[in-house]
Amino acid sequence: MAEENAASSEHPSDVDPEHWNAENYPVPDMADVQLIDVLRAVADPIRLEIVRRIADGKPQPKSRDTWGFDVQKSTLSHHFKTLREAGLIRWLVNGRQHDIQLRRPELDERFPGLIDSLLAD
Amino acid sequence: MAEENAASSEHPSDVDPEHWNAENYPVPDMADVQLIDVLRAVADPIRLEIVRRIADGKPQPKSRDTWGFDVQKSTLSHHFKTLREAGLIRWLVNGRQHDIQLRRPELDERFPGLIDSLLAD
DNA sequence: CCGATGGTTCGATGTTCGTCAAACTATTTT
DNA sequence: AAAATAGTTTGACGAACATCGAACCATCGG
């Protein structure tokens, strides 16, 4: 079963200590994440591309310019929120700078092979 | 690149000869199938369940009762069409009886590990 | 303290999509 | 030929969703 606190699925020390503010943007416990929700999240061209670009697990800034998508920043923000709430990413907040990170180890354990299969071709 | 005829991606002898009418319901060439389309097709609860139940590659009838979904037959028909046009299944037509079949070998070659990852849990 | 910066949230808009009922097509049975 | 059966297609409707602009919030640098 899942834990009470949605943000406590990982020990705090798993997260780079310089990113101290992540608890403002809770992430669902991976045990509660349903496959259908992950699929819905990834069944959008922009979000799929985002996931592919962060597949290595390295944090990437949210800044609109680094992605180069032809959408407004509010739209991009919406996509990041969708990915977080679906359980795919976490937000690493450090001052004004926000990063996103794929929850790769958890995802690989919960849905073996899924992320890998999104990277082909 | 893909072949001209959308229904010619497989040699006819690959299909059970008793199902002779499949050419009325063309299937996209697997080389033309985009990951995003497969994901969209599978990002629906009913269609995901269908794919999981035919994952073994065995043909299954379309008949509403065999599936037990709480939708009208026109809705089910729509889902089958969506899956076919997205490249996931083919239709095997034999008189009044229609079967669907997952294009498993082709899918596994085009998107390694994807179908498998949908079956976990 | 003030402006600039990086990002979120809200409300509105247009599009996509799942669903149904009804009409239709094709095949089999009587 | 007529009725029954199996499935498709069409049109309508509502819900979900991607998008935008504007307002908002927080942080950093003068």
Image: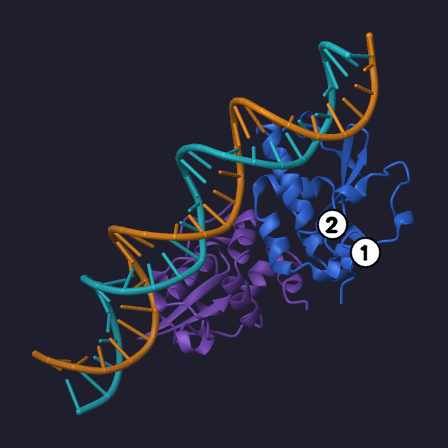
Chain colours: A purple, B blue, C orange, D cyan
User: What amino acid is at disc 2?
Assistant: Val
Other residues around mark 1 within 10 Å, as few (<14) / some (14–19) / many (≥20): some
Other residues around mark 2 within 10 Å, as few (<14) / some (14–19) / many (≥20): many
In screen coordinates, is C29 left or right of A77? right
Quickly name the residue at label 2: B27
Q: Disc 2 or 1, which lies upstream in sequence?
A: 1
Q: Quadrant of residue A115?
A: bottom right
Callouts 2 and 1 close, C-beta under 8 Å: yes
**Taking A103 as reference, is B72 above or below it?**
above
Q: What kind of element bears circle 1?
A: loop
Q: Which mark is residue B121?
A: none
In screen coordinates, is B3 left or right of A21? right
In this rendered view, identify the residue nearer to me: B85 or B47. Answer: B85
Image location of residue A108, percent across then percent down: 61, 60
In this rendered view, identify the residue nearer to me: A103 or C22. Answer: C22
Quickly name the residue at label 1: B9
The chain to which mark 1 is attached is B
In this rendered view, identify the residue nearer to me: A94 or A40. Answer: A40
Residue at horizontal 79%, vertical 51%?
B7
Q: For the residues marked 2 and 1, what is the alpha-carbon distance in whole angstroms? A: 8 Å
Image location of residue C22, percent across then percent down: 54, 22
User: What amino acid is at disc 1?
Assistant: Ser
